[in-house]
Image (tube, helix red, strand yellow):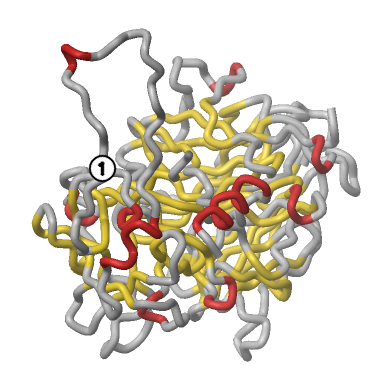
Amino acid sequence: MKTPRTSLYTLFFSFMLFPASVFAQTGAPYIHDPSTIAECDGKYYTFGTGGGGLISEDGWTWHSGAERPGGGAAPDVLRIGDRYLVIYGATGGGLGGGHNGRILTMWNKTLDPKSPDFKYTTAIEVAATDGLEDCDAIDPCLLLDPTTNRLWVTFGTYFGTIRLIELDPATGARVQGNKELDVAIDCEATDLIYRNGWYYLLGTHGTCCDGVNSTYNIVCGRSRSVTGPYVDNVDRDMRNGGGRMVIAAGDRVAGPGHFGRTVIDDGVEVMSCHYEADFDQGGRSVLGLRPLLWTNDWPVAGERLHEGIYVITSERRGYSLELAVDFVRIQQQRQGWRNIDPNEPVPVLPDQQLGEVIGTWPQGNISVRCSDYMMRPHQHWMIQPVPEAGGNLCGPYCKIVIEGTERALAATSELELTTVPAFTGADEQLWSIQQATDGTFRLLPKWIPGREGINTRYVLYTPADSSPTLAEWDFASDNAKWNIRRLTR
């Protein structure tokens, strides 16, 4: 850590006058310096500075209750085989002992404090600094290299360099004879990840622990070798202060730090962090979850989705998702282009209004289709989180209804789509909207009638240009991908 250095018009105007709800973690997600999220027996855990941490049943609603002895700061956790390795800084970072830092590891069979198997092993020291050398042993992270099965740790703060060491994945102890290697400066709270032949070193830059005035942001460099050198997108070495931006302040949250990566599915990833201050939660430090996108093999945080009116178009063809209703023409007084008087006032044509067409729609269920986007009421979807429905690591469950109505998109037992006249909160009317690593979206109904359990396989899909359905997720196919654009007027 570093100290500071309704009507349609009513609906529309309510969005203009009052900020729409952001898709943010619910419950009590208060934490500082969170570890990478770990899953254990169907629950999610993250540990923070001070010894405690958070637990979530679904990945979206968080509460206190995770336990970790030893106090200290900035832990990380990694499942190796059937055990969990926890690493943390016992001192350092200006805490007790100043910069006399110590990095410790310990094991547990489970992360559930209510389990009879919950018992941490005695912590062992794997690195230390004396307070005088150019490094501070704090803020460790873990990487089990999937190509070699070797276990690596980076640690350090602004007090000096970021260092890399190797541990034994069987014991959690330091590999005998291993020497520290300096890999970066001018950052802290680092994380190591591997993807597509690249090793990435993500560091937290800026100031922390000053609430809404904290300037934390997350930057990264990459290397073909785990030992570096790590360079950014303009070939600046992180040993010389380089780093490409991954996430900075914005959207009423300040000071993102302590990166963690979670792979949800092929082409769907999430990054975790904390925000030093959430303006909507009293400026408290809270857990943040964002889509993790990859652009030219560089990580970047996706945007948080807000409730609002959206146009949903297929990546396959660019056609708009819409109600399968008769197209109602807009009446327009037209002039031949040869007869236009350039001095004549130019009228502004109004949008087609819901009240002009809704009477032509059937009263019962209406199917959906894809067609050219024509700025019509049957193509405008209100996306709104349903807090009582919970969510997952990718976000809350939402209702998707035609703007100005309660007509809701729903899944059927035949793996097809329909819209019901009114949203009831039924599971087949709830949707998980997840951003893929290429920036497109996939949309999954929470439940498919007649099938057991929460749906994690079937997504909104376009096997033909105009006929959406439900089919298994395939990141390699544009049929499974959608673009979601917020409507502005």
| Residue 233 makes an appearance in the image | yes
- Whether residue 1 sits left or right of residue 344 in the image: it is right
Q: Name the residue under label 1.
A: 331
Q: What type is the residue that disc 1 sits on? A: Gln
In depth, the one of 374 and 409 nearer the eye is 374
Which of the 4 image quadrants contains residue 2? Answer: top right
Q: Position of residue 349 (x, y in %)?
A: 37, 34
Which of the 4 image quadrants contains residue 86? Answer: bottom right
Work out which quarter of the rendered image holds the N terminus and state it: top right
Residue lying at 87% horizontally and 46% vertically, measured from the top left: 95
Farthest left residue?
464
- Whether residue 405 sits left or right of residue 476 in the image: it is right
| Residue 148 makes an appearance in the image | no
Regarding mark 1 in the picture, which secondary structure is present there? loop
- Whether residue 211 sits left or right of residue 80 in the image: it is right
- Whether residue 135 sits left or right of residue 404 in the image: it is right
Q: How crowded is mark 1: few (under 14 residues within 10 Å), some or many (20 or more)?
A: few
Q: Where is residue 437 in the image (x, y as percent from the top left)?
A: 36, 46
Residue lying at 65% horizontally and 70% vertically, measured from the top left: 62
